[in-house]
């Protein structure tokens, strides 16, 4: 007698509300090919990737720069910089707001959104909007695309928000990591659920019961109650099955299914979705397990694409039309180098010795007081060049030469010296030849 006979007998003697298929198929879990955001974030590897990338990206300071006469200068006193790095004027801090937006970027087709509260042309505050609370709308024109946003029944223009979308094609909706990999994430989620049910059953095998003859209602109820106690959270670990009832295993054991190997493979697939080096998640970015190549790949493939999206969104929504020609936002990746102190100072030394930065610029980045040394180091063999006054300084001779106002006499002396030196060499050569 199989399970279908049991179900038929149960139907004859009692209502379906008393004995259901779920009661007879112990521990059955329906399989769904779709995965929600909550289910995806319940997968450890997926949650670790989202949290690591969004957390690190949110902690990187955002700077505002201005192009002026062929030079790029940092604008430090602009209130928008303070809103993006400190107090947003909302319940969330700037870091919390950016982290929430970056999480939505990966987990929602609506992307990450923050409302820009303006008074005239001045940005007063920034307000994060959950992806579930915003409804993007688009026109039907496939060429001249326009987007509006609906929040609590109120319509807003797209330029009133900072919006970052993952793999968008229309500027309205994106394609999140979950939408792009729903089947692979479903496999990982169901594997986790299977392991959970296996632990809840104490490692007992799943299966069904076989009886040589039909069971009466009283026998079915007693057997069902004993089975629940056996698989439930109780100390009872023995079931006495009378009347020749036998247990038939219905699924493979975790060893046969190679559960650990499957979990490892699923995690590797998830790391590939984010292009995340596994050592970054497993050991942490500061641990010894992550190599320099792993950290470089993390910056190149995980952080840079996200930062580029956020930078373009900031330039588009936070700058006035009159500013877009000369101003731009950017993330200060030098802060990221602080994770490794030795590499950070070696990088600063190379930049200073190469003449790319000045001493006080380095000290400023490291939150140290300036020394008033606004010089580019070029070494004694190259002397020093003051970029502001355009003077060449020779420390070991105690001289400062203005290259724009060189004395005419010195030019003549140099010319005569060169001619005289050439004549002497010529006479000597002639004497030697003679």
Image (spheres, grey):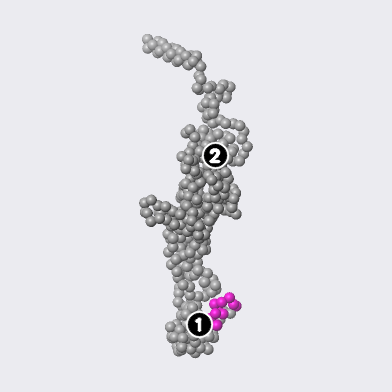
Main secondary structure of the magenta stretch: helix
- From the top left corner, tell me how far across and down residue 376 is, in percent: 54, 31
Quadrant housing the N terminus: bottom left
Name the residue tied to disc 1: 17
Name the residue tied to disc 2: 75
Disc with the residue nearer the chain's start (2 vs 1): 1
Is residue 229 in the magenta section? yes
Residue drawn 54% across the image and 39% down it: 75
Report whether 159 appears left or right of 124: left
Residue drawn 51% across the image and 27% down it: 382
- From the top left corner, tell me how far across and down residue 180 is, in percent: 42, 59
Q: Nearer the viewer, residue 40 or 70?
A: 70
Report whether 122 appears left or right of 179: right
- Relative to residue 355, is residue 80 depicted above or below? below
Check disc 2 and report its element: helix, strand or loop. strand
Residue drawn 50% across the image and 22% down it: 404
Check disc 1 and report its element: helix, strand or loop. loop
- Relative to residue 206, is residue 120 depicted above or below? above
Can residue 317 be seen here? The reply is yes
Is residue 391 in the magenta section? no
Quadrant housing the C terminus: top left
Q: Over which residues does the magenta segment extend?
A: 224-235
Residue drawn 43% across the image and 55% down it: 172
Count of numbered tags: 2
- From the top left corner, tell me how far across and down residue 309 is, in percent: 46, 49
């Amino acid at each position: 007698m199989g399970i279908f006979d049991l179900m038929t007998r149960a139907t004859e003697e009692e209502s379906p509300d008393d004995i259901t298929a779920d009661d007879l198929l112990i521990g059955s879990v329906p399989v769904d090919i779709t995965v929600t955001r909550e289910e995806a974030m319940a997968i450890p590897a997926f949650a670790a990737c989202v949290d690591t990338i969004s957390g690190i990206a949110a902690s990187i300071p955002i700077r505002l720069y201005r192009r002026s006469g062929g030079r790029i200068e940092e604008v430090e006193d602009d209130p928008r910089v303070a809103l993006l790095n400190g107090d947003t004027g909302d319940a969330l801090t700037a870091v919390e707001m950016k982290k929430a937006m970056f999480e939505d970027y990966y987990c929602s087709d609506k992307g990450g959104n923050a409302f820009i509260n303006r008074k005239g042309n001045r940005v007063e505050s920034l307000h994060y909007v959950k992806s579930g609370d915003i409804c993007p709308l688009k026109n039907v024109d496939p060429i001249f695309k326009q987007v509006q946003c609906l929040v609590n029944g109120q319509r807003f223009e797209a330029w009133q928000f900072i919006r970052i979308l993952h793999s968008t094609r229309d500027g309205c909706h994106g394609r999140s990591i979950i939408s792009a990999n729903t089947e692979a994430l479903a496999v990982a989620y169901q594997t986790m659920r299977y392991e959970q049910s296996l632990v809840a059953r104490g490692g007992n095998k799943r299966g069904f019961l076989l009886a040589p003859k039909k069971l009466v209602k009283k026998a079915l109820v007693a057997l069902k109650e004993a089975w629940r106690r056996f698989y439930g959270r109780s100390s009872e670990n023995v079931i006495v099955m009378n009347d020749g009832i036998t247990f038939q295993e219905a699924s493979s054991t975790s060893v046969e299914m190679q559960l650990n190997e499957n979990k490892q493979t699923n995690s590797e697939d998830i790391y590939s979705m984010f292009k995340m080096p596994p050592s970054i998640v497993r050991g942490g970015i500061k641990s010894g397990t992550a190599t320099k190549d792993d950290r470089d790949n993390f910056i190149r493939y995980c952080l840079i694409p996200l930062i580029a999206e956020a930078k373009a969104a900031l330039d588009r929504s936070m700058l006035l039309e009159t500013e877009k020609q000369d101003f731009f936002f950017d993330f200060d990746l030098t802060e990221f180098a602080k994770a490794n102190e030795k590499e950070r100072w070696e990088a600063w030394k190379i930049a200073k010795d190469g003449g790319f930065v000045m001493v006080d610029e380095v000290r400023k980045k490291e939150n140290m007081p300036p020394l008033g040394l606004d010089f580019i180091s070029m070494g004694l063999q190259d002397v020093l060049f003051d970029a502001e006054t355009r003077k060449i300084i020779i420390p070991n001779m105690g001289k400062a030469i203005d290259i724009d106002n060189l004395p005419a006499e010195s030019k003549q002396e140099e010319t005569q010296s060169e001619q005289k030196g050439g004549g002497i060499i010529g006479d000597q050569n002639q004497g030697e030849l003679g």
